[in-house]
Image (tube, helix red, strand yellow):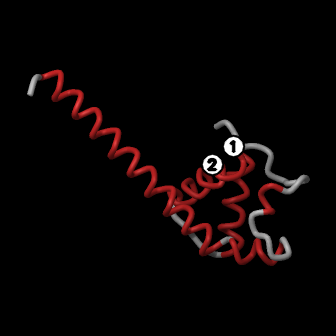
């Protein structure tokens, strides 16, 4: 294998590892959200938990506001996630519902 081929292979494998890690982190954030947030949101939104994110007069209108809201919910419920998990849930919600630029 030539040096160029070796570098190309390393680059491809690096990309695959990054994509796999990203997918695992997203799935972990989704699981955290579903296990800890959906029941309250279901109650608040009359059975449709995801509508809290897409309602017409939602309170979260920016990425920093989303971060603040997830932190507020985490504190109010007593969940106590580490900061990296909070960040993952924020990123998951942004990808799924909000699409804010960071």
Who's the residue at 80% across and 78% down the image?
A: 43
| Marks 1 and 2 in Cβ contact (< 8 Å) | yes
Q: Which residue is mark 1?
A: 99
Reply above or below: 22 against 27: above
Quarter that holds the C terminus: top right
Who's the residue at 20% across and 27% down the image?
A: 7
Helix, strand, or loop for circle 2?
A: helix
Residue 71 drawn at (x, y percent): 67, 60
- Tag 1: Cα neighbours inside 10 Å, few (<14), some, or many (≥20)? few
Q: Where residue 95 is drawn, which disc sits there?
A: 2
The picture quadrant where one finds residue 11 is top left
Would residue 19 appear left or right of 92 to someone viewing this image? Answer: left
Reply above or below: 102 against 59: above
Q: Nearer the viewer, residue 97 or 71?
A: 97
Who's the residue at 65% across and 52% down the image?
A: 96
Helix, strand, or loop for circle 1?
A: loop
Residue 81 drawn at (x, y percent): 55, 67
């Amino acid at each position: 294998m030539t040096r160029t081929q070796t570098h190309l292979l390393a680059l491809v494998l690096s990309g695959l590892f990054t994509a796999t890690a990203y997918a695992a982190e997203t799935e972990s954030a989704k699981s955290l959200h579903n296990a800890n947030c959906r029941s309250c949101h279901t109650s608040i939104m009359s059975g449709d938990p995801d509508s809290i994110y897409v309602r017409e007069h939602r309170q979260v209108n920016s990425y920093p506001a989303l971060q603040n809201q997830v932190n507020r919910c985490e504190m109010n419920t007593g969940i106590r996630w580490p900061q990296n998990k909070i960040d993952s849930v924020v990123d998951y919600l942004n990808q799924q519902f909000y699409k804010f630029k960071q």
